Amino acid sequence: HVDDRQFDSVATLFTETAELTVPDPPDALAPVHSHRGREAIGAAVAAVAAVTRTEHAIVGEVYEETETGGSAAGRVACVAHHWSHRGDEVLDVVWHLRYDDEYRLTDAGWRISRRALTINAIETRPVRRLRPRDPA
């Protein structure tokens, strides 16, 4: 949903009272800013709209059920591309990141109750060509 700019849909993947904690790159790569509730999470995720295009590639995931029924934990590894125009250049700011998640089983199915985003590394790469953003 993020790469398709469907930020409201992203927010529905979280519980009503969920918490999303994110870093402040490039200064802080560990999670430092907290957003609580679907509306705040949707707004936080929508910040990627500032770049022309994104692509989040999941490269690994591990899940485990917790001892209390109806909850689970997971770690998801991702390579996130953020393509944008800067002057005459197109750049790809690549985040190698992980999501440390807690999940809760709700009436609507499994939802994220807590997500902490940590960036392990940031790369900046030149891009030869970038497909334009899809029309809304």
Image (spheres, helix red, strand yellow):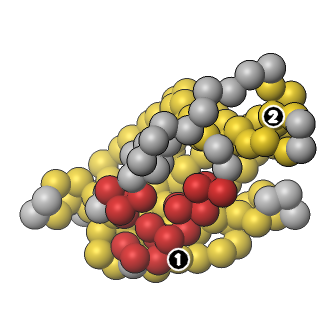
In the image, farthest residue toward the left: 107
In the image, farthest residue toward the top: 128
Task: Pick whichever, 85 or 38, lies toward us.
Answer: 85
Circle 2 crowding by C-alpha within 10 Å: few under 14, some 14–19, many from 20: some
Q: CA distance from mark 2 to mark 1?
A: 30 Å
Any part of residue 93 in sight: no
How many labels sit on residues? 2
Name which quarter of the figure residue 94 lies in. top right
Q: Residue at x 55, y 50 (%)?
A: 99
Q: Residue at x 16, y 63 (%)?
A: 106
**56 shown above or below 17:** above
Circle 1 crowding by C-alpha within 10 Å: few under 14, some 14–19, many from 20: some
SS at circle 1: strand
Task: Pick whichever, 83 or 21, lies toward us.
Answer: 83
Q: Position of residue 131 (x, y in %)?
A: 61, 27
Q: Amino acid at mark 1?
A: His
Q: Residue at x 42, y 47 (%)?
A: 136
Task: Pick whichever, 127 or 70, lies toward us.
Answer: 127
Give left or right: position of 57 versus 32: left
- In the picture, the disc for residue 90 is 2
Q: Residue at x 81, y 36 (%)?
A: 91
Q: Position of residue 101 (x, y in %)?
A: 46, 55
SS at circle 2: strand
Give left or right: position of 102 versus 123: left
Residue at mark 1 = 35
